[in-house]
Structure formats: structure tokens, C-alpha cells
Amino acid sequence: MEFSEVPTPKLGLRDVLIKVRIASICGTDVHIYDWTRWAQHRFTPPRIIGHEFVGDVTRVGEEVTQIKVGDRVSAESHLTCGHCYQCSNGNSEVCRNFKLLGVDHDGAFAEYLVLPEHVLWKNDSNIPDEWATIQEPFGNAVDTVLAEDVAAKTVLILGAGPIGLFATGIARACGASLVMVSDPNNYRLAISKQMGAHIAVNPRRQDVVQLAFDATQNNGVDVVLEFSGNNQALNQGLKVITPGGRISILGIYERRVNIDLNKDVIFKKIRIYGITGRKVFSTWYKTSRFLSSGLVDPGPVITHHFPLKDYEKGMKLMKDGKCGKVILNV
Ligand code: NAD
Ligand code: ZN
């Protein structure tokens, strides 16, 4: 990965040129920086990475109708095709032909980027730049938490990375009566308390399953939200979920997972939701309102700022996990 001078990207008829204000680092960016097995199979350089950002529209193509010069925008990172079976049926988060911003299309860790009009989101003027840039991962958390309601329910959140931390704030805002968060990273557990966790547990030192039963009169939790991508954590979640409860899974696993389907899923009659991307744009509306109304303050999750040219410092912090969201000022 290198920092270099490149030409300003060219604009198509339905495209918009955006001058980036700030961007933020996602785990995907770190995978590319690290050149992991996933990156080697999925990513073809040269490519400008980054998909979480906020910026100002500086030019629009001739056929652009909804976006104007001066609009302050962010973007849905799934560049959908708009015509496949899924897109045609209101399920564009699983578009069969989607391209990922910053992976298949030049991204936002740059002064300028070009995007098709149909993926742009005009930001609410009440939302500051550093909140606007995190709406994309925040939207993942919204859909994971709200696959079903959480009002007056007991919730276990596995993994307190930025998305699990946003989910903590969302679950509290939506009236969960108990939010317990598990993560081996004490730095992040401390942030989970600021986001409203009633109980923060370190699974290396404490018995997550026992503590969850203790906190729920031995009933187990109504809702498990899986953000760790860790098989052991997933199994802890499946053990403590109360029969008839639900689990939403956003975490991505390095290998095939091993679970006891008969005992932990079928005979407990639990509901499992796989969550990916965001509903376009209903999730963005919800996200925007959670933030602009003050229902959720994502401030504690946003821990570091660096100039774009110092992106390596941000990547290293993300690898160490001694951070929440890292912002890059362009
Ligand atoms: P992250 O890597 O920052 O957070 C994962 C957290 O899980 C870390 O804090 C880690 O310490 C913790 N963890 C590891 N082992 C654990 C265990 N045994 N028990 C509890 N916690 C444990 O990731 P993030 O950016 O917050 O994203 C969360 C997950 O969602 C990741 O797996 C990511 O790949 C995935 N993701 C999926 C989508 C999608 O569309 N499905 C989109 C974005 C992210
Ligand atoms: Zn499609």
C-alpha cells in the first residue's frame, strides 16, 4: 500500500465528483493493508481503498437529477446493479452483481472520488462530519439489532468492535432491559460501558455463559447479537439464548463454523438471522435519525484522528485493537 499522487477521477453522465472531507477505517481496509488471504483472493490492485466517508459534491454528470453541487454526502458502499432479481424485489443488500466501494471501485481514502448518483446519501445537517462518516458501519449495527424488536428484552452482544459498540447504544436506545457485552479487549469493554452496557465481560477471564444465566434468572437471554466472527463466541451465544429466542449474526468467520444444530438451534426453536450490508435506503433513514435525534451518541466509539498521509498509524492501531473508530482527515 502506498500514498501517491493520482489524476482526479473522470466523471460519467450519471456520476458525481465528491471532495472528501473525512473518511474512516473499516476492518476490510485493514485486511487489504495486511494483504490477508481474503484480500489476495478478492482484491486486484491498483485500487484506492476506503468506503466510509463524508464529502462535498463539486461536480455532477449531465444526467444527474437528485444531487447538486454543494450537497454534503456519504455513500452506500454496495454499488448495486438495480436490475437483478434481488434489486427488483427490495433486497438490494444482497444484489447479485454488487461492486464494493474501495474494493471493486476506487474509494474514499483520497481527495476526490467519483460515484454513481444512486448510491449517494445526503447527510442531515445536524450530523457532524465524524458521525456522518460512520453511518455505513452504524447501519450494519442497526440491521443486526433490529432484525426483531429488543424492547424490554435481555440482549447479549458478542464482540465490542466499532459495530458491536454502536449496537450497544442502539439496543439501549430501543429499550433493551439488559445489555451484556463480551470482548477479550478491555479497552473496548470500557467503551461499551460508555455506550450503555449494563455488564461488560471479558471471556478470557470470566464465564460468559454463567454470567448471562445469572443475569437473567437462569432463563438465558432473549437476543444474541454476534459481531465477533469467533466460533467460540458464537457457541456461547447459542448456549445462553433462551429457547424461542433469536440471534442475529453479522460477524464473518475465517473458517466454517462448528455448531450443535440439534441441541442449540432446532430443539430450542431459535431464529437465526444472517445480516449483510444495509437496506437501501431504509437503514440509512433509521441511522440518520438515531444520530440526528440524539438517541445514540457514537462519540465514545470514535477514538482517534490522523491526517490521511499517516494512514499507517491508523491501520496499526486497528490491528492492535487499542481503538474504536479511526478517522482520517483528508
Ligand atoms: P472488529 O474486528 O473490530 O470487532 C470484532 C471484535 O470481536 C473485536 O473487538 C474482538 O476483540 C472481539 N472478539 C474476538 N474474539 C472474541 C470472543 N471470543 N468473544 C467476544 N468477542 C471477541 O469488527 P467490526 O468492524 O466491529 O465488525 C464486526 C464483525 O462484523 C466482523 O466480524 C466483521 O468482519 C463483520 N462485518 C460484517 C459485515 C456484513 O455485511 N456482514 C459488514 C461489516 C463487518
Ligand atoms: Zn442487483
Image (spheres, grey):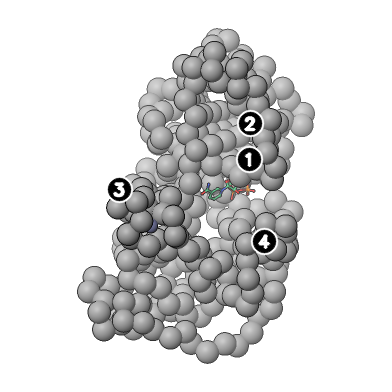
Rendered image quadrant of residue 81? bottom left
Q: Residue 234 carries which label?
A: 2
Q: Which residue lies furthest to the front in this view?
A: 85
Where 271 falls versus 19 (above or below)?
A: above
Q: Where is residue 161 in the image (x, y as percent from the top left)?
A: 61, 46
Q: Residue 154 carries which label?
A: none
- Give the distance between the C-alpha atoms of the residues marked 4 and 1, in whole angstroms: 22 Å
Q: Which mark is residue 89?
A: 3
Rendered image quadrant of residue 79? bottom left
SS category of the residue bearing label 3? loop
* Residue where numbered disc 4 is placed: 41
Of the residues under marks 4 and 1, which one precedes in the sequence? 4
SS category of the residue bearing label 4? helix
* Residue where numbered disc 1 is placed: 228
Of the residues under marks 2 and 3, which one precedes in the sequence? 3
Q: Where is residue 109 in the image (x, y as percent from the top left)?
A: 55, 73
Is residue 50 in view? no
**Mark 2 belongs to which amino acid?**
Leu
Residue at position x 67%, y 17% in the image: 210
- Give the distance between the C-alpha atoms of the residues marked 2 and 4, in whole angstroms: 26 Å
- Residue at disc 2, CB closer than 8 Å to ligand 1: no
**Mark 3 belongs to which amino acid?**
Asn
- Give the distance between the C-alpha atoms of the residues marked 4 and 3, in whole angstroms: 30 Å
**Mark 4 belongs to which amino acid?**
His
